[in-house]
Image (tube, rainbow, N blue to C red):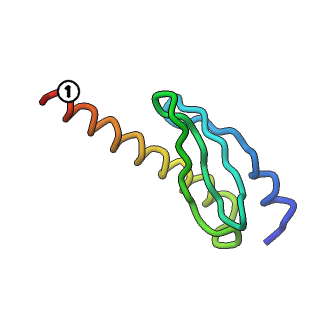
Amino acid sequence: MDNKKVRTLDGEIMLVQEVSCQVKLNDHQWTVAFSYHKEPVSLNVCKEDALPECFIRTITQWAVEEYLEERRFEEICQSMN
């Protein structure tokens, strides 16, 4: 894998469902960091050399979307109680 290309993803800001997210490479692990209701969230995506950059972007987006959907579903359920 081309290290120059992977390094361009580190620190990249992406918008997922109107939530600003930052992709980070920490200790050979890709993570995505964002805030939800002003609380910091960090999700592990995959190991450094596990996937090509385009897949990491897609999986990052899916991980954030899944997190947001789960939290929003929980909030709806709580509001109904």
| Residue type for callout 1 | Ser
Q: Is residue 75 left or right of residue 40?
A: left
Identified at 54% across, 32% down, the residue is 19
Identified at 57% across, 39% down, the residue is 34
Q: Is residue 56 left or right of residue 68?
A: right
Q: Find numbered disc 1 in the image and state the secondary structure of the residue it sits on.
A: helix
In the displayed structure, would residue 23 be above or below residue 38?
Answer: below
Identified at 75% across, 52% down, the residue is 9
Q: Which residue has dot 1 on it?
A: 79
Task: Name the quadrant of the C terminus.
Answer: top left
* Residue 21 picture location, percent across and down: 61, 39
In-front residue for pair 13/41: 41
Identified at 33% across, 35% down, the residue is 72
Alpha-carbon neighbours of circle 1 within 10 Å: few (<14), some, or many (≥20)? few
The furthest residue to the right: 4
Q: Is residue 50 left or right of residue 61?
A: right
In the displayed structure, would residue 40 be above or below residue 5?
Answer: above
In-front residue for pair 81/58: 81
In the displayed structure, would residue 38 be above or below residue 73?
Answer: above
* Residue 38 picture location, percent across and down: 51, 28
* Residue 11 picture location, percent across and down: 75, 46
